[in-house]
Image (cartoon, rainbow, N blue to C red):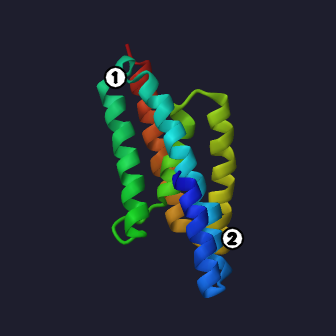
Amino acid sequence: MAPALAVVAGVVHYAVTRDASGIRFLVLYVAPMFLAGPIWARHRLADIEHRKPAVNSIDAGVFTLAVIRFVTSGLLAPFSGHMLFLTYTGITVRASSYRWLVALLLVETTIFKLVLWRDPKSWGLGLALGALAGVVATWLERRA
């Protein structure tokens, strides 16, 4: 339901302001994450009891940081929450269908961050933190 609400909010914003940047942000940037988040949660929660507690903690930390970044619009965090979350989940979720979704959303996020907003700093920090968290979680999971 959240992706649909983001689309409705984008359409209403455009109707009121006639500013396409708001609809583009809500429909193309926000709404897909409201789809990816629950799909990721379904994958991770399906086998949560078989995963090491440390990896579950990293999952929770990455998700929390991404949400904080979204809610505060970057005031408290200099990294991209989209890049952090997508990079991490792309590394840690094994389902190929989810990885394809992540690949598409990473391309989209890259276009927004680098082309539209000219924000290589938060893009790069989010990518680096997500990759680091993903590598650590994968390493911990494979440790005997």
43 over 101 or under it: above or below: above
- At 31% from the left and 29% from the top, the residue drawn is 54
Q: How many marks?
A: 2
Q: Dot 2 surroundings within 10 Å: few (below 14), some, or many (20 or more)?
A: few
Residue 108 position, x and y percent, is 67, 57
Snapshot quadrant of residue 48: top left
Can residue 76 be seen at all in this image of the molecule?
yes
- How far is the residue under mark 2 from the one under mark 1? 39 Å
- At 45% from the left and 49% from the top, the residue drawn is 129
Q: Which amino acid lies under the numbered mark 1 shown in the image of this protein? A: Lys
Q: Label 2, on which residue?
A: 115
Image quarter of the C terminus? top left
- At 58% from the left and 27% from the top, the residue drawn is 94
Q: Which of these two is toward me, 29 or 116?
A: 29
At mark 2, the secondary structure is helix
- At 58% from the left and 56% from the top, the residue drawn is 4
Q: Which of these two is toward me, 116 or 124?
A: 116
